Image (cartoon, grey):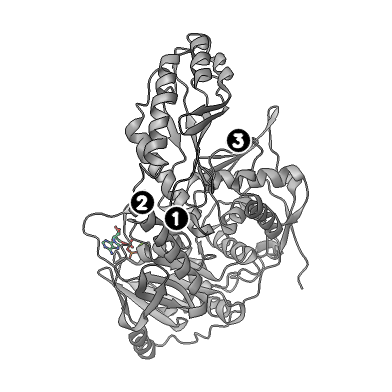
Amino acid sequence: MKRLHSTLDRIDRKGYGAYKDLQGSYDLEGFTLFIDRVQRDPFAPPSLIRVRTDQNGFDQGLFQNQVRRVAFEDFLTRSVERVLRRAVKGSRGSGGSGRIEIQRTSQVVLPRTSMVVANGYVEARMAAGLPARGRTVDARAARTMLLEELPKVVREALTPAGVDETAAREHVETVEDADHLRKQLPGLGLVAFVADGAMLPRESGASDRPLREGAVAFSSPEEFRVTVELPNRGSVSGMGIPEGVTLVAGGGFHGKSTLLSALAWGVYDHAPGDGREYVVARSDAVKVRAEDGRSVAGVDISGMIGELPGGRSTTSFSTPNASGSTSQAANIAEALEIGTSLLLVDEDTSATNFMIRDERMRELVSKEPISPFIDLVRPLYDSLGVSTIVVVGGVGDYLDVADRVILMEDYVALDATQRAREVRESFPIPGAARTGEARPPRGRRVRASSIDLRRGKRETARGKGPNTIELGRARVDLSYLEQLAEAGQTEAIARAIGEFASAGESQRVKEVVCGALGSVERDGLDSLGNYRGHPGEMSLPRPQEVAAAINRIRSLEASTEKGT
Ligand code: ADP
Ligand code: MG
């Protein structure tokens, strides 16, 4: 502590660069402060610091297995977030002076680099704007930040004395229960589960927080109700959606898309209070949508789309500008390539000509390369074992292919399977033999050399907010990845792509993804990127989103492997 004081005294009012002298570690009362990377000037990205407590006095039960540890780390990150908001004065001086921040969390619980709970200590990684007056060191403000505010954060957010252990226990147990519930799905023959009492609607289209006013709690139709035993909370009952083809029907604005979106987020665990704590789906579920304008590199979409104008083959389809239908076909083929057992499709975000073709159009248009999805959903399940949950309000043809129908009425889910059968018999569709055939798409090798990381003299691969990755001078747009939860995942994906590009080898997409995530599993998220000390702000992405990001690199070159 003395050393920190004397360094600060010495550099006071000097040029901002003098802060570099702070780099190093300091024994403070009850914890160690690491100043890993010092920013160049007050306007540059903030300095990276860590605080590590001298001991971990928390009840071991809070982190006794991997799931609990991740949940407890998530809890502590949120608790630091809260204390920072309260205890840090914030802006004082130029640029980012005086701000202290920890990685921002979303509604979901993920392994993150922001927090490490080890047997002997707890470590929080933060970013701090070292305070400046103009472009000179403001040692007084720095002293307040580092020697008053930070110790307060440690006391109130990282030690048993300051942390609400009851809330911590609830957090950890809820996540463990959700994880258990998700793992039970395959054994129960289910692809998703929505607990009675769940709150599905969100605050707004721009916010993933729960809707506070007037939300109708979920309640399962009797026919679909299943009860599952959970390790902590006892039993939970709710709607189990079996494997196969499930239709979600209903009038406009009756909650169909809200249900589907909750299922899409069900691949992740949620923080208590979210409302979707016990809404789970198969962890490899992929929501697929139309995304016209995206680039596609060498994807085998021939299972969905036949020969294109000019005799262009679709076994290795590339375009810088996909249409609604070809983009949706590519999204499905890519999901199958990386691996999925559940597709989620919403008519709101689908290309009409991809979803359906009616009799009149079959008659009028002879040159139609698209096999509509309606012809594909059954074979997808029957031959490939891939289930689908599809939201359809307007196209009754889908009644022909559904194993069951959930009807949303005034936000209430009803079982309309029997009624749908009657309707089908009363209004048969002539000639509606669904004759599609599903086969897995051919795999692809992607060329690392097609990704250019150079940007001036440096090489860059980094996330910019949740929706963009910067690779050299190029940007990858991820705004249509509806299951990407937070910026930390984007950052981790960017670094994984960076490592692949630097290694310079061509690999199958699945190998690239498994390689990156495999090393994370072995060495932790910290191992992505090569910083010592503070690794930056990352959260664990799913293989599906890593692959999706690779697939959206505009310069990407891929070659399709020979069909087997
Ligand atoms: P649909 O897809 O059937 O047209 P949405 O799912 O988009 O309908 O929902 C329409 C509106 O109703 C949205 O504003 C949504 O937030 C709200 N909503 C959905 N489910 C509920 C619910 N259970 N309770 C209250 N509001 C809901
Ligand atoms: Mg909708």
In the image, residue 36 above or below residue 70 = above
Q: Disc 1 versus disc 2: distance between alpha carbons?
A: 9 Å
Circle 3 crowding by C-alpha within 10 Å: few under 14, some 14–19, many from 20? some
Q: Which mark is residue 181?
A: none
Categorize mark 1 by other alpha carbons within 10 Å: few (<14), some (14-19), many (20+): many
- What is the three-letter code of the residue carrying label 3? Gly
In depth, the one of 307 and 275 nearer the eye is 275
Of 99 and 338, the residue lying toward us: 99
Q: Measuring 59% from the left and 63% from the top, which residue is drawn there?
A: 335
| 460 to 487, vertically: above or below | above
The local secondary structure at tag 2 comes to helix
Counting residues from the start of the chain, the first of labels 3 and 1 encountered is 1
Q: CA distance from mark 3 to mark 2?
A: 29 Å
The residue drawn where x is 68% and y is 27% is: 456
Contact (CB < 8 A) between labels 3 and 1?
A: no
Give coordinates of residue 216: x percent, y percent: 25, 64
Nearest to the observer: residue 386 or residue 115: 115
Give the quadrant of the C terminus: bottom right
- One can see residue 543 in this view: yes
Quickly name the residue at label 2. 165
Q: Residues under labels 3 and 1: Cα distance?
A: 25 Å
Q: Residue furthest left?
A: 214
Residue that mark 3 sits on: 533
- The residue labelled by disc 1 is 62
Residue 310 sits in quarter: bottom right
